[in-house]
Image (spheres, helix red, strand yellow):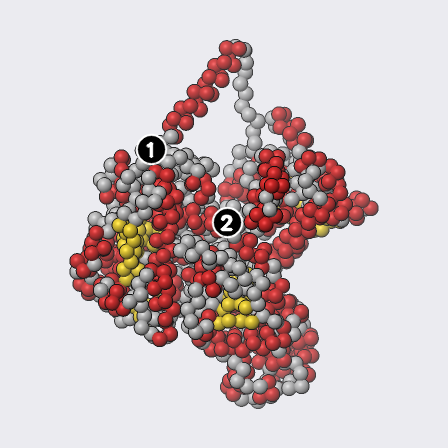
């Protein structure tokens, strides 16, 4: 579920703790009276009465006589379970925070321009009693309608509403896109003849973190198998040796050694001693804590590794070096072995353990502005130059940004997929009652102690689940053992975590803190990805000279923004840097993958762990979105990267160059076959034209009818500012066409019609499809409603279900047809929301231009009707507001009709399209569509304040009062 700042609405269904809500005999009745007077949602924009502000001020005056230090300390002790509620006396901490906020908000609203100094003092005192780093801040788990994000935003003069909707304004390419799929790659014809030397035979994998290295090695191995397997590499394999990866000696880090032994086969201390790269890494990094040791110079590092190739024979004989981090090790190996190809994967901050970086007092940012750090970054930039035998890719969006900022080089985004997991590591715990809380440094902090106690107290009254803390498991938990838990809770202690990738690859349902909670938690354990200052330009890159970091070889869109903040900030400031934390969190992997659940409060967490449909969540995680985006991209990047390296190392001889596949549209073909196929197409076309001319010399060839208007970006934006686009959606046979016809009679509404002066060959088509907009465009997927290849798939589906056992059919989604009339809403993937990567300026312009061909643009309201709008509304609303300085012009009417009436009408009129569906199947499709619409309304329209953009219309009411359909003034 999307994160929400108003998670407290769920608390009404759960019992609250008395010391959080200040209820019960231990507290004055004045607190309950005050809470009863508060609005359901309390933000700086909430209109508050003078009486409520006066009541809050009276409560604050009464509390002035308290010993605040002792009272706040006692509350902290109660959070950790060290004291009883009676020990607090009448001290109501969350009530006081709310009272301070009420007074400050009231002052802020009555002020003419800037925030008054007295209001700032009240806000500061509210945050102060939440203690250092807001360790006492579990407001979401209480029934007080105040959130500390609003306090911090107002104090830092940030717009709290914009912070909460930040994800809507960031470019969609911060997410992994789906560029190709593995089935397409496997279907390629093999290169002829087989390339006997097209893949590396001897590989050395170097790094610090075991699973970071395995992530790359397994992707490389699979990429070679998938791309070259049919050309001669299948079964030949290649030898991989591991270097580095020292085993920590710290007593609390045995799991690192166990994982190293299990996954890499390095189990003895003697292997550490014989490995100069392990010695170097252990000297630069405290392996147990993953923290840098004291600063050093680049020349010292070069001297330490000078004899490494002689001491390590596999390194000397390697054809390819796979290197992850620390990046300084990759740079030094390239300097030592410049003729050996290297695959560098940015999987951590490149300045981690770099020379010249020093820790600063009272700051979480390591200063990497010294000359030694500058020398390293210049060497790093040189290593990634196009004339070097190094291919670089980024494992995370944030590391792609960091490399661009620090070295001025744009790396392709490969992503991670946990390909190294054993086959048995697949989630199998939906019936389990044990929830895993993954290992995290957060749990060792004061916040962790409070979290453990509150979880126990809420659990005792609200949940029958049991919680297992991985840090306390005592033994190393294998992947097979991990897969048996019901689900996992993971804390974002950095912007990328391997444990997150591993659990996601198992398709295990995951819960992570909501954005608002994550912003606060980074002050306890700062995100390492954004804790290093420094750039190869020393003072930071100039965007005016170099352009934004995501500038690709293709022309950049004018709307692409630059960095709002440099990729480093001090997490120890009070209050925490809200806008910077919110901005850079969007570069993390926790918000990039479908199906990840978020929790804001303890009651919400426990309720969702009990009630969420785990199998549906797991199915969404197993959907094609992640494997397509991650697996294909990292395979393609690694394969083609090695090909470029290999061709370079062989002097660029074409005969030895592997056959990397290029993208030439939606399908891929071999480079070698492309000229022949093109020649054959031209020959056939010329033959057909020649025969037609011979048969009828007077034939006239006309251009095909236009499919869209030629409109510029500025023209489209002008129309979007001056029109409202009204989308009508709902299931088939629920009265959509009738509603659209009634709306079209309004003098200000322009329905989709054949326009005067347009090519008449389109007129019959527009009429035949009942003016459905989904048929008149090429941007939005049709979800099978166009019935392309529909009957073929339907036949195969019916045949498979007849001859195969039911459990086999359940394991293969393609055997259950989930597209087209009467079933499109059943497919988990048939839904586009506001996070879709399709929300780009090009799509906005193209879609409007296509539909504008059928609209009378002189009218104010442009009407579009399609059944699939019921699962597209957040996508369309955000698309129409993209790059505009005004709110989105998208408006929606959702037609509803009794499910049995819809099902029976569809069954009667659907003909052979639905002859395999029962009434129950059609009702199930109705339920899924309505659930999706309701979820979108709550998670997007209501949450972001767009409730006025949607309108529900009941078909039965429409029959009684047809004029209801034309009541569109508010839309």
Q: Position of residue 323 (x, y in %)?
A: 30, 56
Q: Position of residue 342 (x, y in %)?
A: 27, 51
For the residue carrying disc 1, how many other residues have a C-alpha within 10 Å: few (<14), some (14-19), or many (20+)? Answer: few
Callout 2: SS: helix
- Horizontal arrangement in the rendering, residue 773 relative to residue 476 (left or right): right
- The residue under label 2 is 625
- Horizontal arrangement in the rendering, residue 214 relative to residue 142 (left or right): left
Nearer to us in this view, 111 or 916: 916
Q: CA distance from mark 2 to mark 1?
A: 32 Å
- 694 vs 68: above or below: above
- The residue under label 1 is 192
Q: Are marks 2 and 1 in contact (CB under 8 Å)?
A: no
For the residue carrying disc 2, how many other residues have a C-alpha within 10 Å: few (<14), some (14-19), or many (20+)? Answer: some
* Residue 631 visible in the displayed image: yes
Q: Position of residue 65 (x, y in %)?
A: 57, 89
- 198 vs 168: above or below: above
For the view shown, which residue lies furthest in the right direction? 960
Q: Which mark is residue 7?
A: none
């Amino acid at each position: 579920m999307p994160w929400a700042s108003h998670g407290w609405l769920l608390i009404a269904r759960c019992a609250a703790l008395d010391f959080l809500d200040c209820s019960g005999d231990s507290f004055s009745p004045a607190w309950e009276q005050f809470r009863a007077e508060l609005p359901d949602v309390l933000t700086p924009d909430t209109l508050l009465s003078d009486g409520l502000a006066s009541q809050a001020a009276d409560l604050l005056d009464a509390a002035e006589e308290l010993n605040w230090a002792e009272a706040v300390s006692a509350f902290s002790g109660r959070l950790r379970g060290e004291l009883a509620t009676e020990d607090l006396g009448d001290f109501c901490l969350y009530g006081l925070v709310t009272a301070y906020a009420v007074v400050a908000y009231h002052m802020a609203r009555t002020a003419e321009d800037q925030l008054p100094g007295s209001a700032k003092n009240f806000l500061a005192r509210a945050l102060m009693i939440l203690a250092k780093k807001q360790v006492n801040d579990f407001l979401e788990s209480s029934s007080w309608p105040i959130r500390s994000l609003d306090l911090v935003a107002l104090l830092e003069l940030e717009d709290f509403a914009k912070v909460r909707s930040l994800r809507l304004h960031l470019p969609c390419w911060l997410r992994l896109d789906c560029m190709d799929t593995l089935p397409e790659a496997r279907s390629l014809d093999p290169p002829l003849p087989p390339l006997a030397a097209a893949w590396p035979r001897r590989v050395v994998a170097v790094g610090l973190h075991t699973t970071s290295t395995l992530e790359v090695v397994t992707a490389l191995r699979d990429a070679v198998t998938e791309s070259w397997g049919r050309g001669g590499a299948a079964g030949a394999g290649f030898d991989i040796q591991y270097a580095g990866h020292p085993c920590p000696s710290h007593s609390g880090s045995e799991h690192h050694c166990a994982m190293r032994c299990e996954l890499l086969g390095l189990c003895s201390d003697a292997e550490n001693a014989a490995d100069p790269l392990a010695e170097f890494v252990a000297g630069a990094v405290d392996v147990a804590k993953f923290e840098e040791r004291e600063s050093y110079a680049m020349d010292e590092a070069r001297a330490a590794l000078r004899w490494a190739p002689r001491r390590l024979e596999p390194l000397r004989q390697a054809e390819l070096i796979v290197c992850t981090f620390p990046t300084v090790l990759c740079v030094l190996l390239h300097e030592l072995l410049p003729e050996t190809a290297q695959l560098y994967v940015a999987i951590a901050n490149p300045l981690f353990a770099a020379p010249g970086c020093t820790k600063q007092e009272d700051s979480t940012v390591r200063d990497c502005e010294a000359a030694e750090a500058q020398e390293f970054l210049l060497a790093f930039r040189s290593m990634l130059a196009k004339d070097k035998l190094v291919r670089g890719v980024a494992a995370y969006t944030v590391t792609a940004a960091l490399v661009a900022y620090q070295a001025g080089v744009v790396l392709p985004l490969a992503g991670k997929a946990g390909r190294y997991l054993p086959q048995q590591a697949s989630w199998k715990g939906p019936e389990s009652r044990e929830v895993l809380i993954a290992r995290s440094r957060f749990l060792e902090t004061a916040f962790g102690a409070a979290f453990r106690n509150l979880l126990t107290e809420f659990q005792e009254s609200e949940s029958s689940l049991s919680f297992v803390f991985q840090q306390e498991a005592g033994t190393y938990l294998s992947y097979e053992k991990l897969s048996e838990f019901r689900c996992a809770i993971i804390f974002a202690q950095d912007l990328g975590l391997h444990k997150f990738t591993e659990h996601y690859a198992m398709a295990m349902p995951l819960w992570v803190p909501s954005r608002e909670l994550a912003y606060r938690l980074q002050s306890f354990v700062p995100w390492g990805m954004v804790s290093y200052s420094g750039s190869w330009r020393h003072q930071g890159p100039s965007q005016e000279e170099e352009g934004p970091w995501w500038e690709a070889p293709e022309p950049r869109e004018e709307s692409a923004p630059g960095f709002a903040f440099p990729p480093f900030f001090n997490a120890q400031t009070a209050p925490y840097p809200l806008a910077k934390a919110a901005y850079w969190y969007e570069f993390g992997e926790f918000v990039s993958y479908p199906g990840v659940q978020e929790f804001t409060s303890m009651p919400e967490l426990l309720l969702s762990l009990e009630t969420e449909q785990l199998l549906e969540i797991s199915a969404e995680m197993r959907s094609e979105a992640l494997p397509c985006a991650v697996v294909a991209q990292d395979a393609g990047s690694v394969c083609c990267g090695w090909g470029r390296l290999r061709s370079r190392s062989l002097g660029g001889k074409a005969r030895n160059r592997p056959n990397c596949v290029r993208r030439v549209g939606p399908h891929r073909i071999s480079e070698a076959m492309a000229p022949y196929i093109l020649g054959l197409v031209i020959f056939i076309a010329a033959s057909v034209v020649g025969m037609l001319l011979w048969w009828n010399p007077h034939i006239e060839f006309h251009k095909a009818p236009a499919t869209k208007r030629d409109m510029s970006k500025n023209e489209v934006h002008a129309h979007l500012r001056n029109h409202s686009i009204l989308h009508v959606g709902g299931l088939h046979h629920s009265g959509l066409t009738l509603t659209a016809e009634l709306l079209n009679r309004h003098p200000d509404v322009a329905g989709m019609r054949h326009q005067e002066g347009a090519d008449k060959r389109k007129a019959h088509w527009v009429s035949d499809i009942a003016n459905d907009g989904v048929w008149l465009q090429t941007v939005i997927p049709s979800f099978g409603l166009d019935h392309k290849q529909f009957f073929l798939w339907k036949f195969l589906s019916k045949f498979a279900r007849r001859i195969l056992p039911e459990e086999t059919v359940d394991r293969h989604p393609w055997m259950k047809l989930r597209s087209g009339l009467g079933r499109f809403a059943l497919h988990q993937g048939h839904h586009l929301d506001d996070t879709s990567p399709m929300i780009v300026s090009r799509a906005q312009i193209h879609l409007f231009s296509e539909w504008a061909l059928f609209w009378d643009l002189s009218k104010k309201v442009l009407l579009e009707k399609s059944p699939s709008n019921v699962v597209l509304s957040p996508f369309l609303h955000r698309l129409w507001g993209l790059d505009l300085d005004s709110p989105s012009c998208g408006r929606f009417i959702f037609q509803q009709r009794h499910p049995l009436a819809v099902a029976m009408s569809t069954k009667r009129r659907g003909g052979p399209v639905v002859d395999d569906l029962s009434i129950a199947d059609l009702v199930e499709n109705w339920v899924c569509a309505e659930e999706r619409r309701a979820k979108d309304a709550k998670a997007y329209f209501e949450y972001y304040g767009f409730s006025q953009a949607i309108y529900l219309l009941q078909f039965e009411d429409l029959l009684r009062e047809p004029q209801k359909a034309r009541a569109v003034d508010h839309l």
